[in-house]
Image (spheres, rainbow, N blue to C red):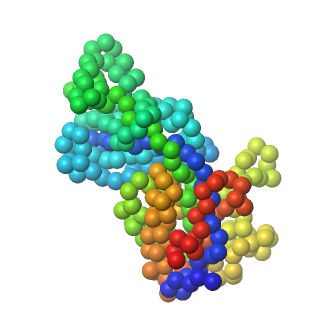
Amino acid sequence: MMIINGVTIDKTFAEAFPMKATRAIITAQNEKWAMISAQAMTGFATSVIACGCEAGIERVLDPSETPDGRPGVSVMIFAMGGKGLAKQLETRAGQCVLTSPTSALFAGIESDKPIPLGKNLRYFGDGFQISKVIGGKRYWRVPVMDGEFLTEATTGQVDAVGGGNFLVLAESQPQALAACEAAIEEMRKIPNVIMPFPGGVVRSGSKVGSKYKALGASTNDAFCPTLKGITKTDLSPEIESVMEIVIDGLTKEDIDKAMRVGIQAVCDLGAANGIKRISAGNYGGKLGPFHFHLQEIMA
């Protein structure tokens, strides 16, 4: 048994699966407008189950870190395949970055598999767009009403991992949420990962399958506190709230790091703040080949 600051770490593992990922850099006149564009581009992207992709803001970039020397935001998008990833990237870039005042869009990752970033968005210029090759990279200048939209033609696609996770089991809803907020604050310091759910936290963890044939996933009743008396529960009497943090990363090692700092932040609050257990969602190893064993990560 592993206990950290009064919090039991279950002997279980999170189960994750292969994905494809890309990174893009959005810049703007100031950080406010770069962030507005990034938030729009990564909206409605919590789960591939219904959103088509999983996306999130990786971090804010200092002007010294961006291609055009302006404030920027790094965003990451994950999808189950390269075709879906390319479609999601292009649609979101066209609707959320091209449209956003003062924005520009650049590649955020190198790979031998380029996918379109602004390559097709240039056609919005209706023939007035012009191309420049600088340092071996192609850029497009597209005339728009506030001036011009500058975009790099392509960005890279890489293999990635989706679905790392852990569950926070607490005595009350406010305590579970406070613990997750503390975890997310630390996890956002780790590069190459995103936590795609709202604020990084999901309260509606799911299991595979449902009594309704049309649904491929349904509520994880074993971890629902209101169902303790009528289902095969995994909760002890004092647990009144469970929340989950899901992580997508470029590598298994990136997710390991994020899980480690997140779980540690929860354990730092400890039993004195109502945190009882850390567990994880898995499906007996059937869902994906990447297994994140909680006790090994925290050893």
At 23% from the left and 51% from the top, the residue drawn is 62
Quarter holding residue 225: bottom right
Residue 124 location in percent, x, y?
36, 20
Q: In this view, does 132 lie above or below 205?
A: above
Residue 87 location in percent, x, y?
50, 31
Residue 98 location in percent, x, y?
34, 31
Q: In this view, does 187 lie to the left or right of 34?
A: right
Pick out the residue farthest to the top. Answer: 127
Task: Name the quarter where the N terminus is drawn.
Answer: bottom right
At 27% from the left and 41% from the top, the residue drawn is 27
Residue in the foreground of this view, choosing between 273 and 154 = 154
Quarter holding residue 223: bottom right
Residue 13 location in percent, x, y?
63, 66
At 23% from the left and 40% from the top, the residue drawn is 67
Q: In this view, does 87 lie above or below 265?
A: above
Residue in the foreground of this view, choosing between 136 and 219 = 136
Q: Is residue 121 above or below residue 74?
A: above
Pick out the residue farthest to the front. Answer: 112
Q: Is residue 267 left or right of residue 232?
A: left
Residue in the foreground of this view, choosing between 48 and 23 = 23
At 30% from the left and 52% from the top, the residue drawn is 60
